[in-house]
Amino acid sequence: MSPVHYVSLAVILFVIGAVGVLVRRNAIVIFMCVELMLNACNLAFVAFASMHGNLDGQVIAFFVMVVAAAEVVVGLAILMAIYRARRSASVDDANLLKY
Amino acid sequence: MKQAYVLASGTNTDEVARETIFWILAVASIGAALAMILVRRAVHCAMMLAVVMLALATMYAMQGAPFLAFVQIIVYTGAVLMLFLFVIMLIGISSADSVVETIKGQRMAAGLVAIGFFVILILGIGHAALGPATPATAANGTNNLSGLATLIFTTYVFPFEVTGALLITAALGAMVLAHRERTTPRPTQRQLAARRLASGHMAPDPSPGVYALHDAADRPALLPDGTTSDLSVSTVLAPRVVTEEPPSVPPRKEQEAITAESGREPASSGRADA
């Protein structure tokens, strides 16, 4: 398989993740869609690495994974704090800064 | 050359098999990703995300990145997804999205934006000079793992150390965010005892279901006068038995008849009946 196929698949997955972020209301589901987008980026990085025949793309994908892990930890902690304060995980209910 | 190509692709399967695996995984991952944004429950969404991640891990392995494939399975599917499931468990497993659109026409607009975004990205890829996979160069070292280690600890050593700082900061942030300040002083043993005396219910709660016909934790206990005691059923269980028939309470006479028939203690007769 040529890297074009993998990059095209990464584009499709990224767009699906973006749609999920736009249309869903549950904060956890939005978070999972962000993870899907990060995974799509990783797939593109690995495909580029195999296209160029070196490992730099794989190293970048590795760093993306580390940053995603840190992001998940902080994001889920924020989610728990919001849920404790407002008893809801819906992004529509966190509207104190509106207007 | 053939040997170098196999090294680059990372697998020893032939081209046809790799193509078949790619298309199966592509269809599976796109289907699972679509299901992610269509299912209503967060738990199902997490399961679909697991499917996508495992498919991507296999693709990494097919593209000559075995280390990333295993990191993907261990860190992403293993740790990150379990963290998601833990939070879903804490927030409530039944938390489902409502299907009502709060902003009018939001889904339609999101679909249009997605199509436009997709077209732009595909056009960009079509214009980019994407070549076929090139064989691994000597810079890769003897294998994928040692090549990655060489890169991380030479060229990318500063970003690597920065990610260490990032992880420490994230751990601290999670601890600060998860910490709850106590706003009221902790009640002392004396206060707890006084509260229990004031409640008028000093003995421990009765055990559930021991004297009823069913020996189950969601069945209320029978009081001496034949009525049931709601105190005996855990408040956690109460919402779960809504779909079932309400706990049937035998009248006192029936209970006595059962006891007389079997000639045993009421508790054991209840167990025999269940």
Image: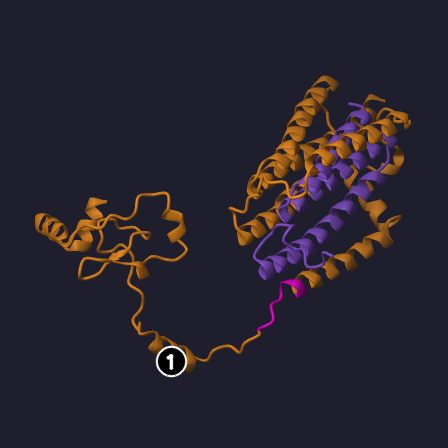
Chain colours: A purple, B orange
Please give the chain letter of the residue carrying mark 1: B
Residue B247: percent from the left, percent from the top? 28, 48
On the question of residue B89 being in view, the answer is yes
On the picture, is B22 further left or further right than B136?
Answer: left
| Residue B143 coordinates in the image, percent (x, y) | 79, 37
Q: In which quarter of the image is residue A1?
A: top right
Instruction: Tell me which residue sits at (22%, 58%) in the image.
Output: B227
Residue at position x 82%, y 56% in the image: B162
Identify the image quadrant of the C terminus of chain B. top left
Label 1 is placed on what type of residue?
A: Ala
**In magenta segment, residue B44:** no
Q: For this rendering, which residue is in front, B228 or B170?
A: B228
Which range is magenta?
Answer: B176-182
Is residue A95 placed above or below B28 in the rendered structure? below
Residue at (52, 47) in percent of width and height: B93
Q: Quadrant of residue B169?
A: bottom right
Image quadrant occupied by the N terminus of chain B: top right
The structure residue drawn at horizontal position 17% and vertical position 61%, both measured from the top left corner, is B225
How many marks the image carries: the answer is 1
